[in-house]
Amino acid sequence: MNNIAKLGQEFGEYVFQVTSELLVKTGQPKSLSEMERGIRQALIKLGRFLMGSWLALQGSRYPEKVRPCPRCGEEATYQYKREATLLTIVGQVSYRRAYYVCAQCHKGHYPLDEQLGLRPGELSAELESLTAMTGVQLPFQKSSELFEELTLISVSDHSVAKAAQAMGGEVQALEAEWVAQSEDEDWLQEQERVAARPQRLYGALDAAKVHVRGEKEHPWRDMKIGVWFTTTAVPPKTPEKEWDIQATDLSYYCDIDQAQAFGKLLWATGCQRQAQLAQELIFLGDGAEWIWNLVQEHYPNAVQIVDWFHATEYIAPVANTAFSDQDKQEAWIQQVRTDLWEGKLDAVIAAFDGLVAHKQAGEAAKKAVTYFTNNRHRMDYPAYRAKGYQIGSGTVESACKQIVTQRLKVAGAIWELDNGVQTAKARAALLSNQWPVLKARREHLPLAA
């Protein structure tokens, strides 16, 4: 009897055994839910049996006496078969595989582990991927509880955290490769020859605060966040109408780092989207100086647009403190908003400048004058609308909420710097539909040195 037929026979016998145990144990079920729970548990048992038997078929019954050492290339000699345990999506599975030792470098290795990417004593690549997926969505304790409820497989919150951060570490490794490519002139020239040039590509930058452990003077650090996207939506004809962004093909990236270092990531991720080749490249952001310095340094030909909504936030605080009469407040706000919408920046700046001497509103008015003066070349909203450009940075503000607010700012969360960054990067990758790439990279980890 060949191995497949033997496995089929053994599996059939085990199916009968598990089914019999299920029916005897359950007896007369009280509900369909009870039947479903029993079937799920039975399927886990069957899967565990099949996984172990299938693994047993992978190793040769009579292992080769000598194999090349994967580290130094010299001869490694067969020793014996060692047992190992895997933590898989069907639970804990034991198997035996051949063990070799190299006489030259004295390192041992397991050909079957290397062939299939097996991780004795650790989460399998599939289990790691799935637990990490929950870990970047919810606090680790809740992720552990939810995962067990959904799969009947118990994974500790520590293991969930480790899995999520391993995925984030893989993002860091991938980004390092992108940075190296983006600094390679040959690679950039090749992109100019073969890459499709985007017709219109948007970039946006922002930051959100993260509570970091051990930072006594500055416990809240800026998580800088960027996003690349496309959209065919255009701004409304008047600012009062509903705004339609509908961003598509989004790529998120993030880090807690100095602006100059983050600029390398801005450039590297942009090169992955052929931003440097785009026929039209538009950047959106608020008035933060670091944003526009980076854009100017790495993409000097890009169109720079200050977010419309951020600009209008300077108007009401001045009016509310300058005028006690509500009608005057509303009239002044409406006039300045209209002038800003129509691109009359001289009138906008003059309106604020006229209130600089006001006792209550003076300080806010002075800040507004500086803000609009420094950014006036990024506020030609009529020209932007005429070209169909988006003028609101809602896409990157949404990224800040999804990556930082919804995950890193959960109640009571204080992060070790590296763990927080890796969790954020893993979440950004999931939101960017990059998870299959990370999962594939984690399936066959390199041999330990």
Image (cartoon, grey):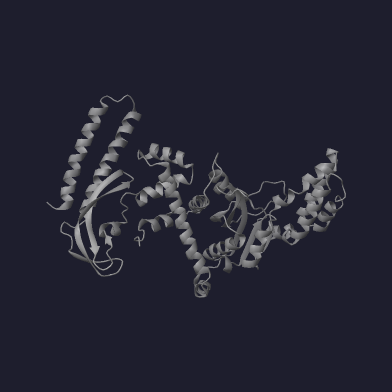
Q: Is residue 67 above or below residue 429?
A: below
Along the horizontal axis of the image, is 136 left or right of 393?
A: left
Position of residue 47 in the picture relative to residue 128 (left or right): left
Residue at image coords 15%, 48%: 6
Q: In x, y percent, where is residue 300?
A: 65, 68
Asked which quadrant contains residue 40, the reply is top left
Which residue is rendered at x = 34% and y = 45% of the image?
89
Q: Nearer the viewer, residue 411 or 58?
A: 411
- Tell me if residue 246 can be seen: yes
Horizontal and vertical percent for residue 5? Answer: 16, 49
Q: As displayed, is residue 50 above or below residue 77? A: above
Q: Judge whether residue 330 can be spotted in this image.
A: no
Q: Nearer the viewer, residue 375 or 249?
A: 375
Give the x, y percent position of residue 311.
73, 52
Q: Please name whichever residue, 37 or 157, is drawn nearer the observer in this view of the structure.
A: 157
In the picture as drawn, the residue positioned furthest to the left comes out as: 1
Viewport quadrant of the C terminus: bottom left
